[in-house]
Image (cartoon, grey):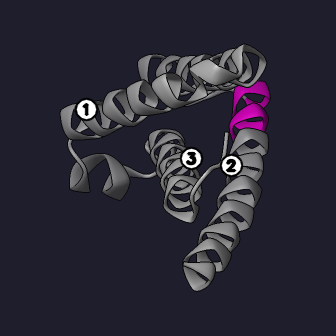
Amino acid sequence: MATSTKELIDVTAALVRLYVFLAQSLDRCFDDAARKSYLDSELQGHLTETRRQLMEILAVNPVVKNKLAQDCDRILALGASCLKGGAADTKTHDAIQAERAILKNKTVALSDLVAVFRAMD
């Protein structure tokens, strides 16, 4: 099955969006401005829709689909526990910082890939 450059761009851009939304959900734990400037319902709506789109796309590869679902669930649970519990303990804070760093690296790499795909199109 041949895949078009547009399809590659769409999949990669959707992953970038998901990782940005996940990072924003973690940012809300420690940044009052992030919580106030971006409504929770709006962020959750974007997250839900982007995740749904990716789960459809990734249906062709259940291993990747399940890994992404587990990553999302873990990150969202971490953010939710932080927001519910108020100030996070050191362990939770460190876990959030580690997840945030991973999301940043994934976002940068995938953003570069989108740029390459667009240049090829």
Check residue 15 in the rendering and tell me which mark sits there, or answer none. 3
Image quadrant where one finds the C terminus? bottom right
Disc 3 element: helix
Q: Which of marks 2 and 3 is nearer the N terminus?
A: 3
Magenta residue span = 90-96
Q: Earlier in the sequence, mark 3 or mark 1?
A: 3
116 over 101 or under it: above or below: below
Q: Name the residue under label 1.
A: 45
Residue 66 in which image quadrant: top right
Type of amino acid at the residue the image marks with label 2: Leu
Q: Which residue is drawn at 78% across and 17% down?
A: 63
Q: How crowded is mark 2: few (under 14 residues within 10 Å), some or many (20 or more)?
A: many
Residue 91 among those drawn in magenta:
yes
Type of amino acid at the residue the image marks with label 3: Leu
Q: Position of residue 113 (x, y in %)?
A: 69, 68
Majority SS type along the magenta span: helix
Q: Is residue 77 left or right of residue 67?
A: left
Q: Distance between the residues labelled 3 and 1?
A: 16 Å
Q: Residues within 10 Å of mark 1 (few under 14, many from 20)?
A: few
